[in-house]
Amino acid sequence: MTLLQPVSGQMALEDLVETACERIDQVVYQQQCASLTLSGTRIYLRGDVRQFVCELPMKQLQPEDLQINQQELLSPSEGIMQTVHERGRPVDELLWTLGWLRSGGQLSDQCRRNDVVLFSRWPNLSRLPTRASTHRIIALLTARPSSIVLASRLLGVSEEEVAQVYSAGMAAGYAAPINRKIEPPVVKPHRHKSLIGRLMQHLQRDQ
């Protein structure tokens, strides 16, 4: 196992979520296996198959669960990683939850109020944090791409409710604007990437 540097100090909620999302994107992009501890809640990730296992249902995660206390890189041959491969959930559900908690009714950095939003896929909402209006918002944005303002007026819900759904959908890859091009996020190499790579190669040779 390789222990990565934890996030420390007091950070704003959006910074905590951004850091958590960056770590998850890094694991997925580099097709690694990892264990993250978010405020005591353990999450196991397999980037190679884009699946995860969390000790808590996504609906139970709260903003205070977003402080990364610890991250370890694991070998894919470890038992828990086999479990993630066989019974894990799509990592998109984890990213939706983080995007949802980060938003809190505000648009994320990638989203704009005048975006014409299309949902290309339905999330598995039975497993995810939602509001009473979430199903109606996604149904509209799936059938009729709309802006935050227009969707709010058509459905009679607040712009904050639409913004939170859009932000979560964008984070998970379910939603995107059709009136402009989104640049793919740049995954920054971890400062210990070279050391981690050598250790992972060593682990794989010993299997």
Image (cartoon, rainbow, N blue to C red):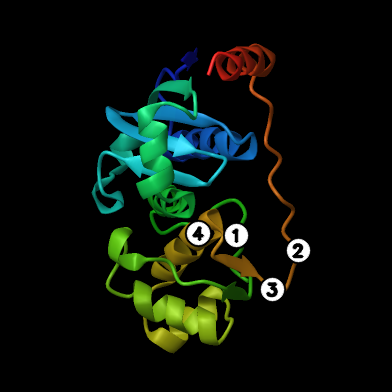
Q: Which mark is residue 167?
A: 4
Task: Looking at the image, tell me whether mark 4 or mark 2 is earlier in sequence order.
Answer: 4
- Identity of the residue drawn at 45% across and 85% down: 153
Q: Which mark is residue 121?
A: none
1 or 2: mark nearer the eye = 2
Q: Does 161 appear above or below 150?
A: above
Task: Looking at the image, tell me whether mark 1 or mark 3 is earlier in sequence order.
Answer: 1
Estimate how packed mark 2 is, as few (under 14), some (14 to 19) or many (20 or more) residues with alpha carbons within 10 Å: few
Q: Which residue is mark 1?
A: 111
Q: Position of residue 20 (x, y in %)?
A: 47, 35
User: CA gap, disc 4 to disc 2?
Assistant: 16 Å
Q: Tell me the kind of residue under disc 4.
A: Ser
Q: Position of residue 17 (x, y in %)?
A: 46, 39
Q: Which mark is residue 178?
A: 3
1 or 3: mark nearer the eye = 3
User: CA gap, disc 1 to disc 4?
Assistant: 7 Å
Q: Position of residue 195 (x, y in %)?
A: 64, 11
Task: Looking at the image, tell me whether mark 4 or mark 3 is earlier in sequence order.
Answer: 4
Q: Tell me the kind of residue under disc 3.
A: Ile
- Identity of the residue drawn at 61% across and 12% down: 202
SS of the residue under disc 3: loop
SS of the residue under disc 4: helix
User: CA gap, disc 3 to disc 2?
Assistant: 7 Å
Task: Please say if the residues under marks 1 and 4 sit with CB atoms less than 8 Å apart.
Answer: yes
Task: Please say if the residues under marks 4 and 3 sit with CB atoms less than 8 Å apart.
Answer: no
